[in-house]
Image (tube, rainbow, N blue to C red):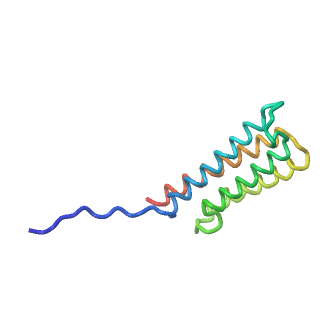
Amino acid sequence: MTDRRPAPTPRRGWSIGGRRDVVAGLLVLAAVGVWAVGAVPGTAWPLAGTRSTALVVLVLGLAAAWVGGAGRASMPPSVMRPLAALGLIAAATATVTLVTGSPLGLSVLVLLVVVLWLLATVHHLSARR
């Protein structure tokens, strides 16, 4: 008789589609939370201003991109170009929001951060298969 053991499941660890995407998702969720709390008028939140909220959202978005593996993963140009274009639009939106203090710009920045995270996570999950 042969000993038939189930094949070991691969450890996901800090691989693509693993913990990094979860941590990046938590950073994006924190950015959305900062935006939601900062958008309430008359709040005692220390980041109630549009510019300071935009700065925190920018830092959290950059941290999510770094943790998620932006720039480290080898992606085909057909995937990388749209993500890079959205990243440049997000950077320009962040710059405009920091200069003008536009609440609309802040909302667009948060939306772009969420969309970039979603697209990157979907790519990571589909690339694993």
Count of marks placed on residues: 0
Left/right placement of residue 99 relative to residue 39 reads: right
Left/right placement of residue 61 relative to residue 73 reads: right
Give residue 59's position: percent from left, percent from top: 74, 55
Give residue 34's position: percent from left, percent from top: 72, 42
Q: Which residue does the image show at 67% across and 60% down from the upper left? A: 81
Location of the C terminus (image quadrant): bottom left
Using the image as rendered, state which of residue 82 and residue 49 is in the foreground. Answer: 49
Give residue 103's position: percent from left, percent from top: 83, 38
| Rendering quarter of residue 42 | top right
Q: Which residue does the image show at 59% across and 65% down from the upper left? A: 76
Left/right placement of residue 96 relative to residue 35 reads: right
Using the image as rendered, state which of residue 81 and residue 14 is in the foreground. Answer: 14
Vertical relation: 12 (above or below) 27: below
Left/right placement of residue 67 relative to residue 11 reads: right
Q: Which residue lies furthest to the left in this view?
A: 1
Location of the N terminus (image quadrant): bottom left
| Rendering quarter of residue 3 | bottom left
Give residue 60's position: percent from left, percent from top: 71, 53
